[in-house]
Amino acid sequence: MRLVFSWLKEFVDVPASADDVAEKLGLSGFEVASIESIDGGDTVIDFEITANRPDALSVLGLAREVATAYDLPLMLPSADAQATVRLAAVPAVVAQGSHNVAQGSHGVAQGSHGVAQGFSPASDRITVTIDDEGLCPRYAAVVADVRVGPSPAWLAARLQAAGIRPISSIVDITNYVNLELGQPMHAFDLARLAGAEIRARRAKPGETITTLDGVTRALEPDMLVIADRDRAQAVAGVMGGASSEVSAATTAVVFESAYFTPASVRRTSKRLGLKTEASSRFERGADIGAQVIALQRAIALMEQIGAGRPFGSIVDAYPRPQSAKRLHLRRERLARVLGANVPDAEVARILRGLGLEVTESGDGWDAVAPTFRVDLLREADLIEEVGRHFGFDKLDATFPVMTQPAPPPDPRITRDQLARRVLTAAGFSEAVTFGFIEAKTVETFLGTQSPPSSQSKTDQNGLAGLAAFAFKNVVGIANPLSGKFDTLRPSLLPGLVDAVAHNRRHGRRDVQLFEIGTRFTPSGETRGVAVAWTGTGSADHWSGGAREVDVFDVTGVAEHLCNALGVAVRFQPVREPFLVEGQAAAILVADGLERGVRMGLVGQIAPAVADARGLPRQDAVYVAEADLDLIQRARVTASDATRPLPRHPFVVRDLSIVVADALPAEIIRGTILTAGRGLPAPLDAVSFFDRYQGKGVPAGAVSLSVRLTFQAPDRTLTDADIQQSVNQILAALIREHAAIQR
């Protein structure tokens, strides 16, 4: 809101400078964006007004704040001839009825179930009808004979200083009143209205309107329009129509001043992609008591600059007047919340200065909130108003005395900090992406692969809650900010892959990112951790060239992270529609009560998905994602007791076998560990150290070399014990996998 300082002084004669006023209001909660000197020695203060204070989007609203801050009288608009801001003494006739049809037929305002008397004979030039009181609770209008021309220099200069382009005297008057009083207005060319009728109704199916910007817009049935007898002439609260636009040939206009439901204007403005000065005020909540005053101010300005005169009375269609909001402020509650005792006289002064009616009661004050303060809904709001103008700088800066010990920290915080520390130490940088994704991103990650019902049982289990199933069960947003943020993310991977693509587009060859965040499904929220890696797996060194990252690097990172969080894991091949087949695995819990539960996945992003997300198609991007909440449940608490170092030596035996090349090493490891239970020589560790295919190995087979480590805690192992144990393990491999010893 650009506040012209000379305009402000018409409402409050403040002796301070513009800089002092800006600082004072800044301390009262209004952020100052800039202070600008303009021609003529005037100043413009640009305020950032929060969404809950639509009353401050006007000169009068900010003047009320200045008057309260400096304890000065506020000069309100008045019909008094000596008033600084003058209103025209034009009477308003209130029409009431269930359909609220206000007609000026021979001076009588009629409704379907009621009659409002007092219209002048000239009021028969316009009829006002409200078809939908839910979307338009109040509509006021007045006819005026006008002479359209350029506005006087002072009026045009003020509009320009406030950021509004002057157009013509009549249009400029509506914009001037909007800025001054915060009540949007519109002017229709009366001659272009069919039947001299104004009707607030919902749009008809298939109805269109060409707005003042020259764009033809399709309307929807839940949109409110202002129409004449035949067609829509304006999108209510957003923009007028070109067919009834005021032009140089206009001789009579209908000034509109109405109240439209904020949700309706916000929804219509968003669907039409049309943001205006009027819609920004209506969608926050206009003053339902300002419609007639705005018309009287517009008429006064019109007479002041010689642009015309009113014809008849103001027609005010207000079927169900709203009752005032009554609030109670307790003296004890005020002192407790602010932590300071505010004098009673100061409380009453502040609240009355802000426009409230205040009466003292036994334990505090009873207040009636004005209609322009749509944000005053409860006692806490009154406490905030008192605190703002009493001065937060006067409040005690010490913390209140603690009466109970602080609660222990949430264990999830410690868990997330550990995960962050482990991944940072592994060379990854943290990314923070949006919690919203685009709906078509879901389609990209699902691809064309068959749904889980047509896959194997292993695949279905591997996908459940983590990948394809999660992407098929997304949560849409009812009122998205844009099409790119219309779905809550079921996974961290889409945002992380997009972050990798962003880095690649800016010349980063090697990218290692991780994110810790929330995922959303219809069943609720879960906390997850994800990594993405592309580029080299090891840095260049004089002893050897760089190596490209592969799936084993990311698998190692996932395993290292899970081990650091206290969960042993194993990996199982899985199919994912957005990962390369054969380069994807599910992360399973290896031990404990949650043994066998799938808690994540690792793999290479499919080239088609990488291409769709803006990555070079030749880039190999590897990702991993795990459920932190499940990790916490699966965590096996380790004993803090120390154990003595082994006193007896370990023995290592290497075993080379030939097995089918489609047999996963994890299965072989499981067979060895199962066979190793109860051996004469206790099996302490199993590791693979070589894999070979080629000469001497049959086609379709692979040679694996396994290192077996044996160690007993109470004795030195003999060769006989070792050999017997190796033979039992080899027999199990031959029996289970038809292995051949090399």
Image: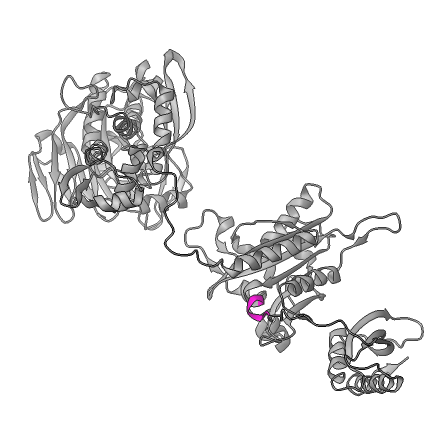
At 65% from the left and 62% from the top, the residue drawn is: 564
Taking depth in this image into account, of 22 and 581 the one nearest to the observer is 22
Quadrant of the drawing holding the N terminus: top left
Q: How is the image coloured?
A: one colour
Q: Is residue 403 left or right of residue 253?
A: right
User: Number of marks in the image?
Assistant: 0
Indicate whether 18 appears above or below 441.
above
Snapshot quadrant of residue 87 = top left
> What residue span does the magenta drawing correspond to?
631-635
Find residue 742 and report its image quarter.
bottom right
Vertical side of 544 occupied by 233: above or below? above
Residue at x 88%, y 87% (from the top left corner): 720
Of residue 537 and residue 257, the one placed in the foreground of this image is 537
Q: Is residue 462 left or right of residue 475?
A: right
Q: Give x and y (percent) for residue 592.
A: 61, 76
Residue in view at x 15 percent, y 17 percent? 82
The image position of residue 669, as x and y in percent, is 76, 77
